[in-house]
Amino acid sequence: MLKKGEKVLVAVSGGVDSVVLLDILGRLSTEYSLSLIIAHLDHRLRGEESSEDARFVAKLAEQYGLPLIGESIDVRSIAEERKVGIEEAARFVRLRFLREAADDAGATKIAIGHTANDLAETMLFNLIRGAGMTGLAGIKPVNAPFIRPLIEISRSEIVSYANEHGLSWREDRSNADMAFTRNRIRHQIVPALSELNPDVIGALLRTAEIVREEQDAFFELLEQPWQEALKIEAEEGKICLNRAYVAHVSIGIRRALLRRALERVRGDLRGIGKVHIDSLCQLITSARAHGEIHLPGLLARVQGGELILISRYSRPETVAPQEVPLGRTEYPLFGIALNLEIVPWERDLISLKEAGQNVEIADADKIAFPLRLRTRRAGDRFSPLGLSGTKKLKDFLIDSHVPFYKRNTTALLCDEKRIILVVGKRLSDAVRVDAGTRRVLLIRWKEIT
């Protein structure tokens, strides 16, 4: 899990698991030359108790002489915004915070205090919902950059260690709230199973290890079919598969290929169940040449011999209009940087465009400033350079061979009256340079990531 000399971000909630994790890593830090940074997220879910947790962790950081990265986020509002449960929103916010904190600190690993009990509870949670190999494998000990050094240690052993070493910790009262499924599993189902097998946690731990080993073997065998099926994985959030190949392999391989593709597009498989894979299989094997379905977080579309998967989170499908000033400005949601200048008209400027640079030259006096950058809207029309009159923007994008999954995120530079530039495609004929032009708007752009 760890190499000598690594910088490790330690997630510390203040609970006994994370306090023990911090203490153990602190004791190992000298031997392994580890640099430790503490990370704590206040979820704002328990009022003053959450603030007290944050203060407790700050004292721990002072006690261990370690830097602390702390943040406070209103998880409840995130849950409402994303229309998900509190648990799912908390997980999303927590993982995002830890990744960003690790990047800021230059940490190569993120240590989390999951125990054998957490692994067992996760397996049972997945089993109750219905799960395949991935669900029954539970929590991975290592899932870079995350590591879980305590994953084979039971919670009772954790508490014993804490008492033996005189450690103090915070108790989260929400862990006793039976409204949460995981708490019912922890306090009701696991104790009931322990009556049948006192070592039920150990048994589930061994099962998870077996499943992970068999899953690794299966994934190794899946590599060749994956290479046969994959046509394009050109950019994050988009994958194209060979529809005919996927439709004709055995159902087990087909489902595994689709799960892998979905995971690569979305980043994970949370919210993806058997019903979604079944729908995707039906789409692929149907007689229709074209069709599409919406799955959690993505769009799946068949076009002739291709299956295309596009993440709905790779970029928003609609972006609020943004004012565009003169000078250079980056627009991450559009994936571009624009550099605008108003200069006297000289024919030598044409050489910039002829040289293949991302440049357009518009008559500045034909533009109704201010400028804004936006995405397409219903009813948009455009007057492409060299064409008299206007045409539907949708038709222009199709004629310009813009893939359907990029049309909703294509950047449009607009003035107060109209679209003056489809960035990367064509200038509007309404702002073309002519014999009366005295000054021009020089528009340069480049893609950013």
Image: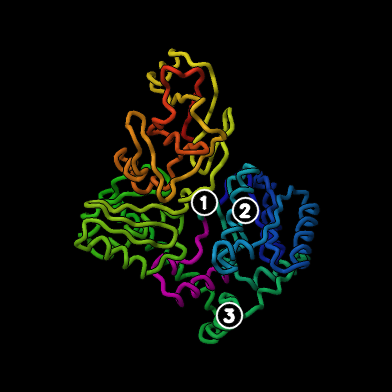
Q: Which residue is drawn at 80% across and 56% down?
A: 59
- Left or right: 345 as drawn, with respect to 31: left
CA separation in Å, label 1 and label 3? 30 Å
Which residue occupies the foreground of this view, 40 or 270? 270
CA separation in Å, label 3 and label 2? 27 Å
Residue 135: horizontal and vertical position, in percent? 44, 68
> Which numbered disc flags the more N-terminal residue, 3 or 2?
2
Residue 278: horizontal and vertical position, in percent? 31, 68
> Which numbered disc flags the more N-terminal residue, 2 or 1?
2
Contact (CB < 8 A) between labels 2 and 1?
no
Q: What stretch is highlighted in magenta?
A: 117-142
Colour mapping used in the image: rainbow
Q: Which mark is residue 144?
A: 1
Residue 411: horizontal and vertical position, in percent? 46, 40
The residue wearing badge 3 is: 184
Q: Quadrant of residue 428?
A: top left
Looking at the image, is 57 positioned above or below residue 102?
A: below
Queried whether the magenta region covers residue 257, the answer comes back as no
Queried whether the magenta region covers residue 131, the answer comes back as yes
Q: Which residue is drawn at 44% across and 49% down?
A: 377
Q: Main secondary structure of the magenta part?
A: helix
Mark 1 residue crowding within 10 angstroms, few (<14) / some (14–19) / many (20+): few
Which residue occupies the foreground of this view, 16 or 75? 75
Residue 33: in sight, yes or no?
A: yes
The residue wearing badge 2 is: 97
Q: What's under tag 1, amino acid-wise?
A: Ala
- Left or right: 194 as drawn, with respect to 277: right
